Image (tube, rainbow, N blue to C red):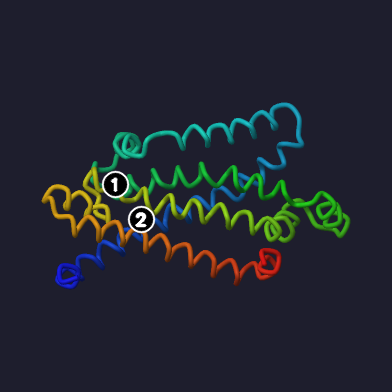
Amino acid sequence: MEWVWANRADLAALTLTHAWLSAVPLLVGLVVSVPAGWWVSRSRHATGAAQWLGSTVLALGNVLYTIPSLALFVILPGILGTGFLSPVNVVAALSIYAIALLVGTAANAFASVSPVVLDAATASGYSSAGRGLKVELPLAGPVLLAGLRVASVSTVSLVSVGALIGVSSLGSLFTDGFRRDFTTEIVVGVVATVVLALVFDLILVAAGRLLLPWSVGERS
């Protein structure tokens, strides 16, 4: 505890850095995957090229998520033209992972909405876009939230890997602790990362209760 107190300023800075490196990819992943997942869910009922393209998007997401994170961190600077130590590389890589995880979840979430509800919305005069935004999205919300919680834990943990290429985060405590053979620093890094992941999860749960109050009773 003495070491933690003596280095509290550095720990706070690393925690804030880790938090924004996690939050930005999650936001990007959500913004991209929701409309993409909605389109993929609709393409399942289409024929020809639309159905093939929807299946290809899901398959591509599965392939992208299998790429090792460290390899992606190393490859992206050459593609993006950024510096090797730029945090942009970590944000871009984790955004790709978040999208890969959430597109399939979003597609399943929209597909879980009852066709009877969709027909009723159409009969009530909703346009395709209006039905998607005002009917399908709220009903798909609980499944989307569950997927976002999984992506959140994954993203917070993967940010630590960026320390191996020199991008500061709570993962820096791991690398520095191993370099100095200082177990306390490693343990603090592990605990801080777990706590941050729990904080993100609690924020998402609270947001779900606020934005999706009708789903609380269903879970109970």
Can you identify the residue that label 1 sits on? Answer: 162
Farthest residue, direction right: 123
Quarter of the figure with residue 168: bottom left
Q: Amino acid at mark 1?
A: Gly
| Residue at 74% from the left image edge and 59% from the top image edge | 135
Element assignment for label 2: helix
Q: What percent of the width, then of the height, locates residue 201?
A: 48, 62
| Residue at 71% from the left image edge and 37% from the top image edge | 43
The crowding category of the residue bearing disc 2, from other C-alpha atoms within 10 Å (few below 14, some 14 to 19, many at least 20), is many
User: From the viewer's perspective, is 165 left or right of 194?
Assistant: left
Kindly check if marks 2 and 1 are in contact, taking CB atoms under 8 A apart as contact. yes
Residue 128 against residue 200 in the figure, above or below? above
Element assignment for label 1: helix
Can you identify the residue that label 2 sits on? Answer: 21
User: From the viewer's perspective, is 29 left or right of 137?
Assistant: left
Q: Say which of 23 and 50 sits in front.
A: 23
Q: Amino acid at mark 2?
A: Leu
Q: What percent of the width, then of the height, locates residue 74?
A: 29, 36
